Image (tube, rainbow, N blue to C red):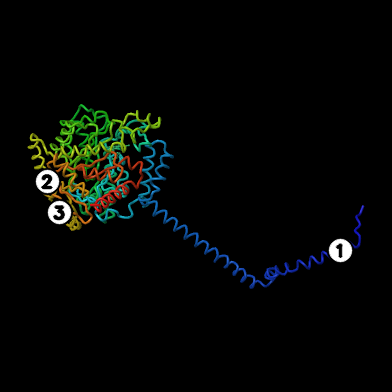
Amino acid sequence: MSTRVPLRVWTSIRSSTVSSRAHFRPQFQLRKPIVHVRATPSRNASTAQTVAADGRSVGTRLKNLFYGTTLVLALSFTYLYVTDTRASIHRYLLVPLLRLTHADAEDAHHFGTSALKALYSFGLHPRERSRPDEAGELSVEVFGHTLDNPVGTSGGIDKDADIPSPLFALGAAVVEVGGVTPHPQEGNPKPRVWRLPSQNALINRYGLNSEGAEHVAMQLRQRVREFAYHKGYGITAEAEQMVLDGAAGVPPGSLMEGRLLAVQVSKNKTTPDGDIAAVKRDFVTCVEHLARYADVITVNVSSPNTPGLRQFQKVGPLTEILSDVVDAARKTERRAKPAVMVKVSPDEDSDEQISGICEAVWESGVDGVIVGNTTKTRPDALPAGFNMPPKEAQILLEQGGYSGPQMFERTLGLVKKYRRLLDQGPKESSQPKKEKKQEARKTDIARNDEPVRSSPGKLEAIAESEKRDAQRLKPLNNGDDNLNKQPLIRLPEQSSLTAASSSSSSSSSSTATPTPSKPSGIQVGQSDSSQKVIFATGGITNGQQALAILNAGASVAMVYTALIYGGVGTITRIKEEMRDEIKGKSSKA
Ligand SMILES: Cc1cc2nc3c(=O)[nH]c(=O)nc-3n(C[C@H](O)[C@H](O)[C@H](O)COP(=O)(O)O)c2cc1C
């Protein structure tokens, strides 16, 4: 059945359709130009297309330029920020992140080391951008070198010398790599490092895991050869020898003016403790491989994780070991020989034990002491009365060496003790031996004065470097009674304190003749020329503590655990705090 539409309604629908067409016309007219353009001849069409495309491309180009510029600026800013040791991201974001992503502290350490190594090879490593040492406010004299600052990194951070250069870039004036054993050894089974986050402390029983002396020597040799290549000397053995002989005017270990590289040596676990000849051979083997590339050789007889090692701190065996190490170091085929230091334990701290160590130091001709290694004891938690989380209380029971801020007062006390006892000089009985050592040293000096093996073309550079050496480097070349100059940074009001405390106890400090104040207000005390050098590590976390350590008689304050908790900006921060402290004190004075 069809639906019939009444005529009136139909008419009305039609008229409304017509009127609605009329109503839509303007819209057709609006589209008309486009329709028209499409309908026009092709030349016009392509011009219009080009105009439209150009319009689009100018816009796109501007947009791309904007995005590109923003990206470049953002990347540059990120690069400048992230690679600056002052960036707080390192301490407050990256360290917690690393801890979160690596539950095992050793894994975290390996990741950090690999990252630093990789970043360094691309030039993307963190570094001190502001050249904070340039003004020389913190410089100190150590072994005849003027160091940029008195802050260093302790042994164990870079056991196999993978990252000495990135560590120097963090602002350290002394980097100690190792401990290295003569033959590779794995160390103790994992896990062997634990964090105590509530205390910013660590417990480790690595047991001197090492790739061995040959491997580490190869790493350091490669570093010297690359340096020689960049200096334009070539990459040959001869070029290496030139750098080691001082042609570039930089210390042969650190390869940087104002910095020193220390290489730590020790014995293999399997070498029987009862066989002192074998133990000495272990140390000497390491020296023979590594001394060429070191400014300082440090002897580790204090690790708590190698059974029996600490017994070699007794005066008899210690004197024997150190004497052999000193003799081996003096045979190093290099114009300037490395200094030798011994790293001691904080647990052997009775007067008798320290006197014995000091006696061995004087008898053997060792140049100084590093105070001290990790402790077997478990210091009280900080702040006093703090209840440790149960998990950490459990970790405290792990066997191993403890390190952390709780050790600071103990380290400070030990530095004072060592300073006092070392400054008493050699025992009467060891006097003749001391003279013998000095004779040996004179022989070294004569050997050092022999012409350097080198190609004639490079002799000029070497002569230049010798001139510089004559001014302030190379303690073993300077004559025998000007060795070990060791000015100490002293706060104005503390210098009198130090003088007061040492006048009652120390012979050498009483001979210190303070030179006139520098404009910065720092007084520099010139110590006895034969004074043994002390480096200190153990609980140092800030600039105030570093200064206290220096004022107690150390020349360098070193850090390990503080770096693990504070990140790559730690050394820059400590130095900044030292400068602030010095400025603050001197402006009050
Ligand atoms: C995980 C770890 C590994 C260490 N390895 C060595 C080492 O191989 N040789 C060494 O003489 N000291 C080693 N130490 C001790 C440190 O060099 C330093 O003497 C000690 O941690 C105290 O200083 P700190 O409080 O600044 O950490 C190690 C310490 C830690 C925490």
Q: How far apart are marks 3 and 2 (CA)?
A: 25 Å
Q: Of the residues shown, which amino acid type is indicated by label 1?
A: Ser
The image shows residue 37, relative to residue 321, as above or below, that is below
Which comes sooner in the sequence, label 2 or label 1?
1
Residue 300 x %, y %? 23, 36
Q: How far apart are marks 1 and 3 (CA)?
A: 116 Å
Split into quadrants, the picture shows ligand 1 in the one at: top left
Residue 185 x %, y %? 30, 33
What numbered label is drawn on residue 225?
none
Q: Distance between the residues labelled 2 and 1?
A: 123 Å
Q: Mark 3 points at which residue?
A: 470
Question: Is there a contact, CB below 8 Å, between mark 3 and mark 2?
Answer: no
Q: Name the residue under label 1.
A: 12
Residue 184 vs residue 24, the one in the foreground: 24
The answer to whether one can see residue 239 in this image is no
Look at the numbered disc 2 and give the secondary structure of its residue: loop
Q: Is mark 3 within 8 Å of ligand 1?
A: no
- Tell me the crowding category of disc 2: few under 14, some 14 to 19, or many 20 or more residues within 10 angstroms, Cα based: some
Which comes sooner in the sequence, label 1 or label 3?
1
Residue 567 x %, y %? 36, 44
The image shows residue 57, relative to residue 549, as above or below, that is below
Q: Quadrant of residue 284?
A: top left
Residue 545 x %, y %? 27, 43
